[in-house]
Every structure is written in structure tokens, then in C-alpha cells.
Image (cartoon, helix red, strand yellow):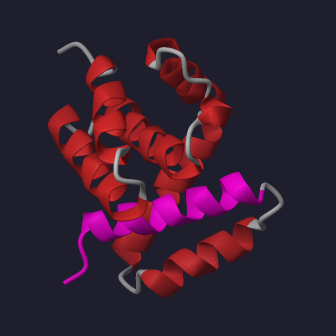
Amino acid sequence: MPRRSDARKAALQMLYLIDINPDAELEHVQASIREQLPKPRLAEFAEQLVQGVRGGLAEIDQQIEQVADNWRIERMAPTDRNVLRLAIYEMQSLETPAAVAIDEAIELAREFGSQNSAAFVNGILDKLIPAE
């Protein structure tokens, strides 16, 4: 059964695509999401994540750079920076509980990133947990 985790995975893949290929057409991104996620509710969630991250990219990247000691956003692995962007957007704009957003981000980092990605992502996100 498809879950929101599947929508996050699809969103991450599209954010990665856009990051590597800034000229990627929005229609292609949306079509890819709908192909991966046949349930409209999940496809809409994934599209919301992609559009939200893209719309707040400058602010999100600034937050990451403020807490990522000795790391500029462009030096981070594309997978890692997009996992971070996705989690930050969810925590701050969709009010996803920090524990859920961080757990999901760590799982994405483990699946798509390098051996050290999960620890890197966890360390950055722990510094950005919104005050409750």
C-alpha cells in the first residue's frame, strides 16, 4: 500500500532531478510523480513538497548554511541537500512533527545517499528543530 513515505521518495527524486538539471520542465516532473504514485492524494502531496521546496529554496538553503559548519550548500552532495530541504520544508511549512520529518529524512538519506548521509542529515536537522 502506497504511503506518504512513497510520496516523499518521489518528491526527493524530482528535487534531485531539478537540482541537477535546472531546465527540467515542470510538466515532466508532475508526470513522473503521477506515474510513480497512482493514488491522487499521494501524488498531490509529492507535488506540494516539490513546489514548496522550490518556492522557499533561498530561505531553506540559508537556514541550512547557518547551521552547517564549514559546509556551503553547493558543496553538499545533491542527495543530502535535497533531503534536508524536504525535511525543513515539511517541519516549517506543513507543520509535520519534527520527529517524523527527521525520521523520514534519515531513511531517505540511508536509501539514496552515501554511507555518511544519514548522520550528516540528522546532525543538521537536529540543529533546526523548531521551538515548541
Query: What residue is shown at x 37% (from left), y 46% (from top)?
Result: 117
Question: Looking at the picture, how far across and down is residue 103, in whole percent?
Answer: 20, 46
Percent of width and height locating residue 82: 51, 47
Residue 119, position in %: x, y? 28, 38
Give me the residue at 21% from left, 33% from top: 98
- Residue, x 40% and y 78% (percent of image)? 40
Side (left or right) of 4 relative to 97: right
Q: Quadrant of residue 70?
A: top right
Vertical side of 102 occupied by 35: above or below: below
Residue 125 in sight: yes
Q: Is residue 117 above or below residue 10?
A: above
Helix, strand or loop: magenta stretch: helix
36 versus 85 height, above or below:
below
Dividing the image into 4 quarters, which one contains the N terminus? bottom left
Kindly give the residue lying farthest to the right in the view shown: 23
Q: Which residues are magenta?
A: 1-21
| Residue at 26% over, 56% down | 107
11 over 99 or under it: above or below: below
